[in-house]
Amino acid sequence: MTATATRVLVLNSGSSSLKYQLLDMTDATRLAVGLVERIGEETSRLSHTPLAAGGDKRETEGPIADHEAALKAVGAELTADGLGLDSPELAAIGHRVVHGGLEFTEPTVIDDAVLKEIERLVPVAPLHNPANLTGIRTARALRPDLPQVAVFDTAFHTTMPEHAARYAIDVATADAHRIRRYGFHGTSHAYVSRKTAELLGKDPAEVNVIVLHLGNGASASAVAGGRCVDTSMGLTPLEGLVMGTRSGDIDPAVTFHLKRVAGMSEDEVDVLLNKKSGLIGLCGDNDMREIRRRIDEGDERAALAFDIYIHRLKKYIGAYSAVLGRVDAVAFTAGVGENAAPVREAAVAGLEEMGLAVDASLNAVRSGEPRLISPEYARVAVAVVPTDEELEIAQQTYALVSA
Ligand code: ADP
């Protein structure tokens, strides 16, 4: 890395998508952001916004065959803005990697051995790790000289104690198949819990925070003094809260029942629980805006879906209050947590005895800044803290390569 190399490209590769952000780490500004969708189809689309140049979003449609072609197309867009991938100012590429198992507790510079290890974890993350690997291989082929760093979604949760991470099943079977609770969204939980401490004017080591990451996927975590001690997602992202399309916690016997009595196949059950459950399964919509609109019109299915969503959220707030013993703050983040005031209000309603309350006028404020929404008298701070996984990945990547 040269002394002038201060840019980090963050890549988040999905099975048919590639999200990217280019940041300058001297002041953590975003130079460009974009997304390639429907990779491998005829109607692939690249949308690119050159923020540094103050330019408008550019969109191009047409077939992009694979991730290599996608990254080349992104490179061409960046080159057009004078930010090309061949620039000596590029210090590193930071990759979001979903599953790091127990092996990866920190961001890690990628070499062949690391690649092999991520590959070994494919059986526990069959949907995500292969796509992440494709992104890494493509980027390495394009810039073999550049440090590439993997930042793992599971890393922040590796501090969970065994009694929180283990399922109460036969130990030998669990160990043979690496079955345990790993947790996901770790980059967000790390960032938001730290920002929440900052908002309170405290050192992260001094505060206990419950983080509620409520996006389309949703997870809660209990963070004690900056370390994760429990989280709601498990072996896979299916466990825990009610999500946009996932059921969250469910009696596992439901799956036997679906197979034995309803005659469904393994794959059908998988699709049912991951794609056709949660809010969409309950009421046909997974967007909280649409659900609130329907509730306002008197739609009972939407109202019940909302109540089920809130009930589960409350149970986790209660459970994690017990796990932590003392709670200093509850932080809401991600699409729903940052934007849906009715969700925040309902999740905390009736928890005054636990020191939790929301101030209606503070809760109604819309802002992109971290903020408190609890009244002054409340014992526990309730906060809205916008998450920024890309910035966290860029910072971790840059810290590692510039050390
Ligand atoms: P993910 O990264 O998991 O795809 P996000 O964190 O972007 O999800 O959250 C997306 C969800 O946020 C949407 O499905 C929608 O339910 C919710 N959302 C976004 N904007 C709003 C809003 N203004 N009001 C309520 N909910 C919103």
Image: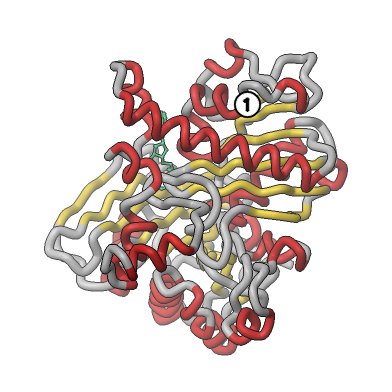
Q: Residues within 10 Å of mark 1 (few under 14, many from 20)?
A: many
Q: Which residue is mark 1?
A: 348
State the image coordinates of residue 176 (x, y, percent, origin top left): 61, 86
Q: Is residue 386 visible?
A: yes
Q: Secondary structure at mark 1?
A: helix
Instruction: State the residue at coordinates (33%, 69%).
Output: 259
State the image coordinates of residue 243 (x, y, percent, origin top left): 44, 46
Q: Ligand 1 appears in which quadrant?
A: top left
State the image coordinates of residue 340 (x, y, percent, origin top left): 47, 27
Amino acid tagged 1: Val
Instruction: State the residue at coordinates (24%, 65%).
Output: 39
State the image coordinates of residue 34 (x, y, percent, origin top left): 36, 51
Left or right: where 33 falls relative to 379: left
**Along the viewing direction, whichever of 346 and 123 lies nearer the viewer:** 346
Where the N terminus falls, by quadrant? bottom right
Instruction: State the residue at coordinates (52%, 85%).
Output: 120
Residue 181 vs 365, above or below: the answer is below
Residue 274 vs 111, above or below: the answer is above
Left or right: where 184 falls relative to 170: left
**Along the viewing direction, whichever of 65 and 155 lies nearer the viewer:** 155
Q: Is residue 75 visible?
A: no
User: Which picture quadrant has residue 20?
Assistant: bottom left
Q: Residue furthest top?
A: 361
Left or right: where 290 falls relative to 59: right
